Amino acid sequence: MADPIKEASDSGWIAKHRDLYLENGEAGHMWDSAIAGGPGPIPTLLLFTTGRKSGKESIMPLIYGDIESGVVIIASKGGNPSHPGWYHNLMNQNEVKVQVKNDVYQAKTRIISGNERESVWKMMAELYPPYNDYQAATERHIPVIALERI
């Protein structure tokens, strides 16, 4: 089975989306997820982390959802057996920079677990149904992360 996230990544989608978002947050905010098997336009944010090995800034466009305490992202990596690099960077930092549309702010991270995770996972899978396929494709427990404005 072809991996639509890898194909989208290989086609340069991530760099193109990131560059558009940095140039114009309003224009970059909505992503047409159909390229990766999703339902169409969905909201994205930019996550700024510092490479735990390189020390360089990394900027990743990610699907997000709103929760009471902030926003939530999923470290799915398309169901890959390993966590995405940005997740490892995130776990190595006390706070991160986030951009939603043209709003740039610092956030603390929190791994969501238990009943809250189940509820948030369901919400995110309704937004982007391939998340359920990604979880089924891997033995790892895909992390759900809250980004809470400082």
Image: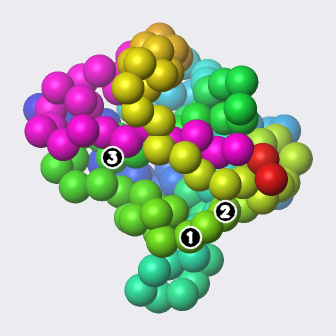
> From which residue to which does the magenta span run?
128-148
Question: Does any portion of residue 25 appear in the rendered image?
Answer: no
Disc 3 or 1, which lies upstream in sequence?
3
Mark 2 closeness class: few <14, some 14–19, many ≥20 residues within 10 Å: many
Q: Which residue in the structure is indicated by mark 1?
A: 93
Residue at point 26%, 31% (across, down): 134
* Percent of width and height locating residue 29: 73, 37
Q: Residue furthest bottom?
A: 54
Q: Nearer the viewer, mark 3 or mark 1?
A: 1
Question: Does any portion of residue 100 appear in the rendered image?
Answer: yes
Tell me the kind of residue under disc 1. Answer: Gln
Residue at point 87%, 47% (across, down): 103
Left or right of 136? Residue 122 is: right
Q: Are marks 2 and 1 in contact (CB under 8 Å)?
A: yes
Q: Which residue in the structure is indicated by mark 3?
A: 77
Q: Residue furthest right?
A: 102
Residue at point 71%, 24% (across, down): 68
Tell me the kind of residue under disc 3. Answer: Lys
* Percent of width and height locating residue 60: 56, 57
Q: Which residue in the structure is indicated by mark 2?
A: 96
142 relative to 91, above or below:
above
Q: Secondary structure at mark 3?
A: helix
Count of numbered circles on the image: 3
125 relative to 55, above or below:
above
Left or right of 69? Residue 73 is: left
Tell me how the rendering is colored. rainbow
Q: Secondary structure at mark 1?
A: loop
Observer-nearest of 91 and 38: 91
73 drawn magenta:
no
Tell me the kind of residue under disc 2. Answer: Val
Disc 2 or 3, which lies upstream in sequence?
3
